[in-house]
Amino acid sequence: MSVFNYYTEAFGKFRDYQNIATRKEFNYFILFFFIFYMIIGFITGIITPIFIISKINPADITLMMTVPMWIYSIIHLLPLLALVKRRLNDIFPVKSSIVFSIFFTYEFFRIIFSLFLSSKYLDSAFKTPTPEIDLTMIGFYLLNYLLSLISCIFYIFLMAKKGKN
């Protein structure tokens, strides 16, 4: 089996929360997920200066940059959740449901917080830029990055922890 098959196989098993996922299966899915995520980010980063030069509204530019990332993340949401649950079944056979519930709740609130951040402060910062709004935005973005870092640490734990398989 080629390594890319582990990535595509996760989409076929998006409804399977009962079986186990090997470290290899989980690691390759995460690897390709982040590679493609970086490619999309790189492409939107290249396209953004073109829109800035053409004097498009800054809020529209930010929206054009984030929409492809959100679409990509939503497409991968169910396969990723199923894969995390199957990986937890391998590592913690008895307590996997509890750990998964905590992980799911945390990720849900992190995503809601990120959406709140985008909608609440993006529009007001472009209409009336003040130092208070800028400092508030910086604080919220730093908190969002901290929450994302905690998620990454959890994924690294799942990648490194040995289970039965």
Image (cartoon, rainbow, N blue to C red):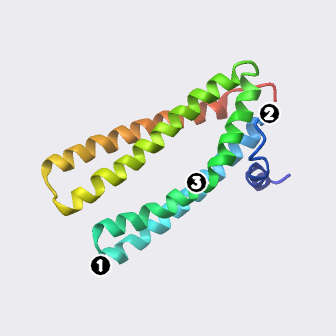
Label 3: few (<14), some or many (≥20) within 10 Å?
few
Element carrying mark 3: helix
> Residue at image x 35%, y 38%?
143
Residue at image position (39%, 64%) is: 63
Q: Looking at the rendered structure, which numbered label has been put on residue 99?
A: none
Q: Amino acid at mark 2?
A: Gln
Residue under label 3, please give it. 74
The amino acid type, in three-letter code, at marker 3 is: Ile
Between discs 3 and 2, the one toward the N terminus: 2
The spot of residue 85 in percent (x, y) is: 70, 34
| Precedes in sequence: disc 1 or disc 2 | 2
Nearer to us in this view, 136 or 26: 136
Check disc 2 and report the residue beneath it.
18
Whether pointer 3 and pointer 1 mark residues with C-beta atoms closer than 8 Å, the reply is: no
Q: Quadrant of residue 22?
A: top right
Amino acid beneath label 1: Ile
View extreme (bottom): residue: 54
